[in-house]
Every structure is written in C-alpha cells, then in structure tokens.
Image (cartoon, rainbow, N blue to C red):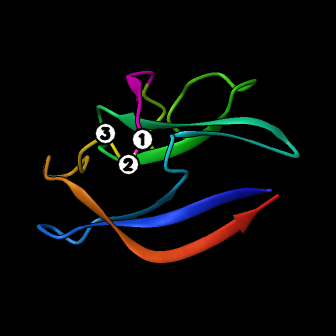
C-alpha cells in the first residue's frame, strides 16, 4: 500500500497528490512522478509505460517530487496540506 499526500502551492493554489519521494510501488507496478516541461502539470506514470505526458503528449518530462521539487506553474515551494490518500 502506498501513501500519497496532497501538496498545494500557496502562491498560485496549484494542487497535486503525490508520493513524498516521487516514486512508489503499487499493485500495478512502480510509479514515478514527473513534471511536464510543456504543459506544466505533474503526472504519475508506471515505470513500464512510455514517458509521454498523458495531458499533452509531450516527451519533455523530468522526474519530480514534492519535497525537492517546486510548483510546476509558478516555481514556488509547495506545502503539504495534511490530506492523505492510501493507494494499492
């Protein structure tokens, strides 16, 4: 079981649910979080999938985690909101 937390940018209100490490293993396999450099969204992809953004089909993805990473929209630091999701 994986634990995902909600992170919010206090500057622009962008929110995302992500694993604090940016990587986890669930029943479907390994999942990594990426930031798309074209549409500026955070996406989670199975390690077995081709690294293509499901939002805009861009291949310009960089690994991302909420602890070290910044808001993809405005570049400010994101904060944990306290909302926790359990994922299988």
Residue 80 lies in the magenta-colored region = no
**Nearer to the camera, 65 or 52:** 65
Identify residue for label 3.
68
Residue stretch in magenta = 59-65
Q: Please state if 74 lies on the left or on the right of 5 as rendered.
A: left
User: Callout 2: 10 Å neighbours few (<14), some, many (20+)?
Assistant: many
Q: Residue at x 40, y 36 (%)?
A: 64
Q: Residue 6: x percent and y percent?
A: 46, 68
Q: Residue at x 71, y 26 (%)?
A: 49
User: Callout 1: 10 Å neighbours few (<14), some, many (20+)?
Assistant: some
Q: Residue at x 45, y 21 (%)?
A: 59
Identify residue for label 2.
66
Q: Quadrant of residue 63?
A: top left
* Secondary element at tag 2: loop
Using the image, tell me which numbered label, if any, was put on residue 65: 1
* Secondary element at tag 1: loop
Q: Residue 28: x percent and y percent?
A: 85, 42
Q: Please state if 38 lies on the left or on the right of 25 as rendered.
A: left
Q: CA distance from mark 3 to mark 1?
A: 6 Å
């Amino acid at each position: 079981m994986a634990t995902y937390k909600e992170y919010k940018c206090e500057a622009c209100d962008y929110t995302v649910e992500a694993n604090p490490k940016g990587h986890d293993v669930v029943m479907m396999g390994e999942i990594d979080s990426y930031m798309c450099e074209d549409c500026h969204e955070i996406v989670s992809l199975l390690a077995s999938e081709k690294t293509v953004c499901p939002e805009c089909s861009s291949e310009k993805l960089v690994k991302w985690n909420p602890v070290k990473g910044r808001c993809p929209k405005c570049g400010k630091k994101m904060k944990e909101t306290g909302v926790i999701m359990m994922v299988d």
